[in-house]
Image: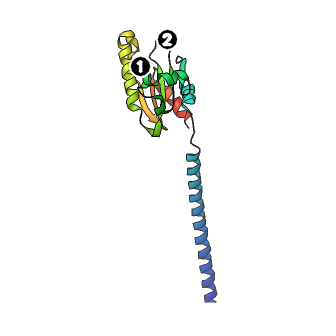
Amino acid sequence: MKLKLLSVLLSSLLIVGLTACAESDSKEDSLTSNESMSSSTAVEISADELINSAAADNMTEKAYYADDIFKSNTKKLYGIDYDEIVDGAIAYGDNGSADELSVLKLKEGASAKNLLEARLSNRKTQFENYKPSEMPKLESAQIYETNGFWIMIVSDDTDSIKEKLNNSMR
């Protein structure tokens, strides 16, 4: 009798232990699956789409990576050859404003920070005497990297544009 009771007790413990392990593995599998889903569902977006989703209303002029105007002006705008860029776009104001949204992705994930800093420096030099009232925008410009894109925002509405960009990449 004692042996039978001990056997039943051990069987019960074994079943409880296996069930707990199965639930734990199931939770881990679920977590791993969810993590994989979130990384595999990362939004693939182009510079064109980013520009179109976030450019301020006064940034009416736009050039995209595949456009001839973008291709022929990358050296002038960013100091880099077109073939070094994987994706890019620019939106800017046509009314003499300093407003600009530049989005660049370089080959092999290279940094475009220095290129955008040089662009910003050139813009400051241009506007310093041309239209000094635009200098506060240029002084508060933001340059940063997210999801492989290097972004420069020059605007009175920098935070709103940045939020739109971030929302587009989710």
Residue lying at 48% horizontally and 32% vertically, measured from the top left: 83
Q: Amino acid at mark 1?
A: Lys
Looking at the rendering, in which quadrant would you find the C terminus? Answer: top right
Badge 2 element: loop
- Label 1 and label 2: CA atoms lie apart by 15 Å
Relative to 136, does residue 48 appear above or below in the rendering? below
Residue lying at 39% horizontally and 18% vertically, measured from the top left: 123
Whether residue 132 can be seen here: yes
In the image, residue 95 lies at what x, y percent? 49, 11
Whether residue 139 can be seen here: no
Between 151 and 26, the one lying in front of the other is: 151
Which residue, given by chain and number where applicable, does mark 1 sit on? 137
Circle nearer the viewer, 1 or 2: 2
Q: Amino acid at mark 2?
A: Asn
Graded by Cα atoms within 10 Å as few (under 14), some (14 to 19) or many (20 or more), the crowding at tag 2 reads few
Residue lying at 46% horizontally and 18% vertically, measured from the top left: 99
Between 37 and 93, the one lying in front of the other is: 93
In the image, residue 126 lies at what x, y percent? 38, 14
Residue lying at 57% horizontally and 25% vertically, measured from the top left: 52
Badge 1 or badge 2: first in the primary sequence: 2
Badge 1 element: helix
| Residue 159, label in figure | none
Which residue, given by chain and number where applicable, does mark 2 sit on? 95
State the image quarter where residue 136 is shown. Answer: top left
Between 76 and 136, the one lying in front of the other is: 76
Between 13 and 71, the one lying in front of the other is: 71
